[in-house]
Image (cartoon, helix red, strand yellow):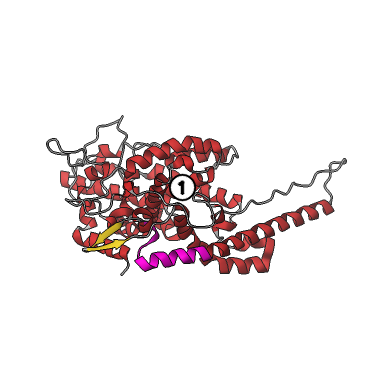
Amino acid sequence: MSLLSSLNHSATGSRSLRRVFCRSFSVSTSSFFSPSSTSFISTRRQPQGHSTPKSWLEQLYPAFFTETPIYPNVLRIKSLTSSGSAGPHDLSSLRPPPLPFVPPPQAKKNGRITLLQRLRYRWRRAAALNKFYKQGIAQIWGNEKECTLLRKRLAAAGVSPALAAIYGGSNLTVQGQSISIPQISRREFQLLLRHGSDFARLPGFALVFWLFRSWTPIIAARVPSTCERPSDRSRQLKALCNRYEFFAHSRNDKLENVTDNSHLTITEQGKELHTLSRRRVLRWHYVVVDEPLCKLIPWIPYAWTESAARFFDRRCRDHYRSVLADTVLIMREGGFNTLSADDIYEYCVRCASPTFINYAKQALQNGANPASEAMRKAMVPVLEARAKRMLAIDWTRLHPGLLGLIEPLSRLQDREHSDSVRGRTG
């Protein structure tokens, strides 16, 4: 059993996650609206006496924390310089190479473009695309050797990349046994996170490319990330914006079940509001996690909400854990201000930042590149403030098996952080 499996087993054994989420709440429909329009009836346990103020997560879910500190303080672990050939912040080997621009043919004096001009243009475009794909495939092979060495390091300790990113450089106590966690840099974490998917897609993509060459974009269904054209990234971003638009319009779906509640008792209202809250979390999974099974979420019947939410909570936990780990490493290595525009773009897409999505919508409408320096300058303070608040928890008492819950809870239930979806109208 891996260390992550042991942590998850220990967490679910010590306290049922379903019991944590399904505990009795003092709730009202006000929790589904913005703070300016209605009062919020808190579900938090208030600190007694003159105790130290609790973090946002402990106020919402005190059962996530142990009574005494037994785990490493993640915020005090120092950064590690990448041991790879690239620099500590260089993710260029994980991104597509530049796609050469081929200028379109110019009309002659009579205003016409000859057939020969068109054929030459198509040939130059095909040659540029072939070179682009060859470079992308070569990058995958180049990453394989480094990724294999990293996996061997982590396999010896039995830890996942996310745990190594968060707790690396410290000793983690699991079931009474102290385990030394190897430390990795953000570049190494991103390599472990992305390369597996790219390498799995490589055989099929390489075969299609060998057979069809410049026709590959039309035929290939699964393209490695290092072979994605700018148009492929734009299409993925538009899909993210559409998924968020669906969430924004359906977040209060079925709320009339409790607002028109003359026939419901207080207990029934509480159960109904709990189902609505779980349905909102379920639909947030649809926005953030871009995988085929999650695309079925909009068609899940209302009566199946609880069972579907439990299933997708488990399925999406690894994604949220990786976003949290990436956030920890970014803050550990100097903060978001050290990242490039492409770094910020990729992070915002992976965590589905509502502020970024609103910016991206405008950029796409204007035909501009969302991964711009202007976007970077606008997003850095937002992401920095959000990360500081999300990570400001007592890590020495937080059970590591619950790491996959922090990102969605901070996004959906922490009203005060700068990039929350609570209270938003779009």
**419 over 194 or under it: above or below:** above
For residue 298: magenta? no
Which percent across, then down, holds residue 236? Answer: 53, 51
Under mark 1, the amino acid is Tyr
Which residues fall within the magenta stretch? 145-162
Q: Residue at x 27, y 61 (%)?
A: 7
From where the camera sits, is residue 421 visible? Answer: no
For residue 158: magenta? yes
Which percent across, then down, holds residue 89? Answer: 50, 49
The chief SS type of the magenta part is: helix
**In terms of image quadrants, where is residue 413?**
top left
Q: Residue at x 49, y 63 (%)?
A: 147
**Which residue position holds label 1?**
347
The quadrant of the image that shows the N terminus is: bottom left
Q: Residue at x 43, y 35 (%)?
A: 381
The quadrant of the image that shows the C terminus is: top left
Question: Would you say 289 lies left or right of 396 here?
Answer: right
